[in-house]
Image (tube, rainbow, N blue to C red):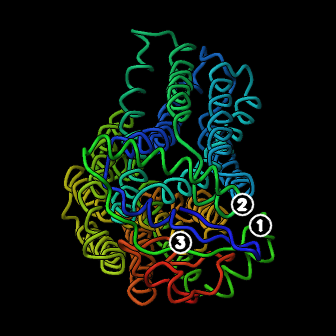
Amino acid sequence: MSAHAADGTITTDIPARLDRLPWSRWHWTIVIGLGTVWILDGLEVTVVGNIAGRLSEPGSGLAITSGQITGIAAALYVAGACVGALFWGRLTDTFGRRKLFMITLAVYLGATALTSISWDAWWFFLFRFLTGFGIGGEYAAINSAIDELIPAEYRGRVDLMINGSFWLGAVGGSLLSIVALDTGLLPKDVGWRLTFALGAVLALVILLVRRHVPESPRWLLIHGRDREAEEIVAGIERRVEAEKGEPLPAPQGSLEIHQRGSVTFLEIARTVFGRYRRRAVLGFSLFIGQAFLYNAITFGFGAILTAFYDVPADRTGYYFAVIAVGNFCGPLLLGKLFDTAGRRVMISGTYLTSGLLLFATAWLFDRGALDAWTLTACWCAVLFFASAGASSAYLTVSEIFPMETRAMSIAFFYALGTAAGGISGPLLFADLTETGRVADTVLAFSIGAALMCAAGLTAAALAVRAERRSLEDIARPLNAVAARAKGRLPGATAGGV
């Protein structure tokens, strides 16, 4: 229940009521409606890489070169994602999670559909930018909504599973490309268009499911819409009680807040880089580490297999599918441990383990002890842990900053990691892995491994013990009134580290 005070504050137990809910079918609706967009992102990225050769062929219906697709189009997609994250992230904190996750998916849907009917290279480039623009906004809006709707006990594993589902899309994109680009089944100028059209159809299905996902009650509380928040939470409770056949346990704790509109950029900056500067260092470290490790492997894996092991270029997709499966299995199998063993142990452990395994891979590669499949197996082991670590980076920045800055914080660190991966990564690693010299590839592996280990050590020192804790406990809302003995969530703190 919520209660208004005469001075314009509100005392509410809504966060505690959301966190004490048992897992239910309603939560699966949230996961399906919001989380499946990562599959679309993986599908997009993989499809474009796999169709580059076909699009550049005469008769494809588009006058474009393979270099333009992997260079200009890829860079514009990354730029769109970075700009979109920052643009939509601010709007998500201002106008709400639900409104923005509907708009950003609609932008993605429209841009992908238009990509399928591109009639000139520059239109293709524009639509790739707009596709990234929509996807970037999705990361801020979706991670905010998921964390604010999923109970504290399950938040870690759910976040990791959803972020890791990117790799399901990557596997699907690899397999879809094999079928769609088979000229025995489809003409050259049709197959690649159908791959993008399918992405638009999947987005439309997700959009229809999202209609049933409510606005975040936590966001509504902050913005003076506590009656709507109460109605939403009461409705969820009725559904869960009907499903479980028993009354819900009583919520533990309440929160007192001032209600007002959105915060300014200056307040966001002071919060993230002033009050929570150690957490900002943690976010920087995690995103930079995972970005460079992934680029050390993925930007050159095809060239390495072709140059050193004579794997035909049209067969490297099968090796990539194996790597993608390993990437998805990491968050899926390790996710629960982030809620039980704890964030600090698991974040630092996954980062350090993946970094050390990549150092070992570099050593074996330098000695000539690997073939194409054993190298792929080593990559798979590295990325099994790295994927869980990378997913935990998104989880971390979405839960360690106050409610009013959540979407913008996610957007900022996402844009940072995406820019590092999409700009610095190719410039550094593509040249190293394509020279055909063993020493250069070993250096690429070692750089990625070193940065991942450095991020792991940073996490060991700075990671926040956020497991099974309310978001308001981890980072008290900026609008929260100073905690009183009987008017606070258990363990709530004012901020800092």
Q: Residue at x 45, y 77 (%)?
A: 451
Please name the residue that numbered disc 2 is placed on.
Answer: 223
Instruction: Report the front residue among 353 and 448.
Output: 353
Instruction: Report the front residue among 227 and 202.
Output: 227
**Secondary structure of the residue carrying numbered label 3:** helix
Horizontal arrangement in the rendering, residue 396 relative to residue 418 (left or right): left
What amino acid is labelled 2 in the image? His
Q: Quick check: can you spot residue 399?
A: yes
C-alpha span from label 3 to label 2 = 34 Å
Q: Residue furthest front?
A: 6
The x, y position of residue 56, in whole percent, is 59, 27
The x, y position of residue 10, in whole percent, is 66, 70
**Secondary structure of the residue carrying numbered label 1:** loop
Name the disc covering residue 260, or none.
1
**Secondary structure of the residue carrying numbered label 2:** loop
Q: Earlier in the sequence, mark 1 or mark 2?
A: 2
Q: Earlier in the sequence, mark 3 or mark 1?
A: 1
Crowd band around label 3 with a 10 angstrom C-alpha radius: few (<14), some (14–19), many (20+)? many
C-alpha span from label 1 to label 2 = 5 Å
The picture quadrant where one finds residue 244 is top left
Please name the residue that numbered disc 3 is placed on.
Answer: 288
Q: Give the label, 3 or 1, closer to the camera.
A: 1
